[in-house]
Image: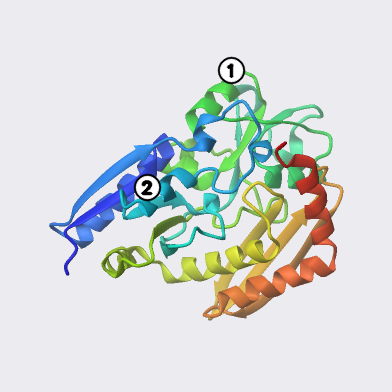
Amino acid sequence: MALTELRIASRRSQLAMVQTNWVKAELEKAHPGLNITVEAMATQGDKILDVALAKIGDKGLFTKELEAQMLVDRADIAVHSLKDLPTNLPEGLMLGCITEREDPADALVVNAKNQAHKLDTLPEGAVVGTSSLRRLAQLRHHYPHLIFKDVRGNVITRLEKLDSGEYDCLILAAAGLGRLGFGDRIHQLIPGNISLHAVGQGALGIECVEDKPEVKEAIKVLEHTTTSQRCLAERAFLRELEGGCQVPIGVNSQINNGELLLTGMVASLDGKRLIRDQAAGAANEPESIGIELAGKLKQKGAGEILKEIFDEVRPEA
């Protein structure tokens, strides 16, 4: 039976709506006549803004409400920033496709008084805003003289806090800044030898119901093969380490001549211990590469570091 209607669930943040409306427009272009509607809602992660993300717990922090809509047949797909989508999905749901990736790098954004500085030249005691334990641990490792302060809220709110002087700089995803039209605020793209990016960063993941083949077929037009291979390797790496979105696990992936090279990192919260390694293999077998790399890091003590972090930041019962 031909698909005539498609219902999309989305977070209602400005960035989420920009991403969802892009998906909607691309699907309308590919499927003329398909009636596509969007239902936007707030997730737990959007509502709780006075607590650090890691303290809330991260299983479905930005996805659970959207998944519930699909499970009760009020939505057919959900559009996520892939870095927010847990690696283990609820029964009955699946990752239907992964879109072409924007630049996955982290970016330094500074206020007016710090325009002359890059990360390497920020003065001792400069206040860096980030809500990511991954960014925090890596930057503490390289720049122990800086002060790190949690920052919550959407991108515009964070930029307002930066410009009002609460922070000297922020670390944000380059892709999100670009999608919101704030690419000109990127002061420096942070190189991978300083900060490996989050699993899936820069790509969108479209989650769908497993038993709706016509929906899966319709969204396949947005699948980007090399992005998908890279992100599936990254997600297998994260899944094998049993890490969530709010842990200091970073990655980088590249494909050259059919070979996928995956770099991975696990760090302690204070940045004093940082384990890093690589694995490579055929790009059409991405998950095996992620699993291999996770095994290498486990042998170097990644499991012990992650257990300590979990014990330290897990939510109180």
Across and down, in percent, residue 139 comes to: 75, 43
Q: Nearer the viewer, mark 1 or mark 2?
A: 2
Residue 117 shown left or right of residue 303 in the figure: left
Identify the image quadrant of the C terminus.
Answer: top right
**Residue 189 drawn above or below residue 214:** above
Horizontally, is 307 left or right of 155 in the view? right
Q: Residue at x 33, y 67 (%)?
A: 220
Secondary element at image label 2: helix
Density class for disc 1 (Cα within 10 Å; few <14, some 14-19, many ≥20) is few
Mark before the other along the chain sequence, 1 or 2:
2
User: Mark 1 sits on what residue?
Assistant: 164
Could you tell me the amino acid type at mark 1? Ser
The vertical placement of 256 against 162, above or below, is below
Can residue 25 be spotted in the picture? yes
Q: Position of residue 221 (x, y in %)?
A: 30, 66
Which quadrant of the view contains residue 285? bottom right
**Residue under the point 75% across and 27% down:** 126
The image quarter containing residue 135 is: top right
- Percent across and percent down for residue 45 are 54, 37
Say which of 20 and 88 sits in front: 88
The residue identified by callout 2 is 69
Q: How many numbered callouts?
A: 2
| 31 relative to 130, above or below | below
Residue 156 located left or right of residue 2: right
